[in-house]
Every structure is written in structure tokens, then in C-alpha cells.
Image (cartoon, helix red, strand yellow):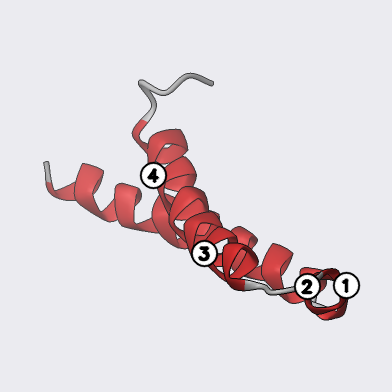
């Protein structure tokens, strides 16, 4: 698996997009208690969904090309 594979690149792109959103939320916290209360399980699920949707989008784009 390398980044030359469109599916891997698409999955990483989707994962990165989801991670950027959560990192933005992380930086907005004002104290440690807010970070402790954050639902990391939901964040991980969003990252997984981003990776899957990115791979599916890459598959669609690769199918058209």
C-alpha cells in the first residue's frame, strides 16, 4: 500500500479532513475538564467515516477516469 494507490490516498484524505475538524475543536477548549468530557469514541467514529467516504470517493473518481 502506497500513496500512489488512489484508494489509500482517498482514505487518508477523508481521515485528515475529519481529524482537522476534531483538532479545531480541541484547540477551542478552555480547560482540561472540557477535553476530559469530550467524546473521543465519537471522534474516532468520525475519523473512520472520513476514511471510508474518502476511499469511496476515490473509487468513484478512479472508475470515471
Residue 52 showing in the rendered view: no
Image point 38% across, 44% down: which residue? Answer: 10
The circle drawn on residue 10 is 4
Q: CA distance from mark 2 to mark 4?
A: 34 Å
Label 2 sits on residue: 31
Label 3 sits on residue: 24
Determine the image quadrant of residue 53.
bottom left
Q: Position of residue 29 (x, y in %)?
A: 67, 73
- Look at discs 1 and 2 and give the one toward the viewer: 2
Q: Are marks 4 and 3 in contact (CB under 8 Å)?
A: no
Q: CA distance from mark 4 to mark 1?
A: 31 Å
Label 1 sits on residue: 36
Determine the image quadrant of residue 33.
bottom right
- Look at discs 4 and 3 and give the one toward the viewer: 3
Identify the element where label 4 is drawn: helix
Q: Are marks 2 and 4 in contact (CB under 8 Å)?
A: no
Residues 25 and 57: in front is: 25
Residue 22 showing in the rendered view: yes
Amino acid at each position: 500500500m502506497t500513496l500512489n494507490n488512489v484508494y489509500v490516498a482517498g482514505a487518508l484524505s477523508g481521515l485528515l479532513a475529519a481529524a482537522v475538524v476534531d483538532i479545531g475543536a480541541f484547540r477551542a477548549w478552555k480547560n482540561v475538564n472540557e477535553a476530559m468530557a469530550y467524546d473521543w469514541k465519537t471522534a474516532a467514529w468520525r475519523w473512520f467515516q472520513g476514511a471510508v467516504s474518502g476511499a469511496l470517493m476515490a473509487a468513484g473518481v478512479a472508475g470515471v477516469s
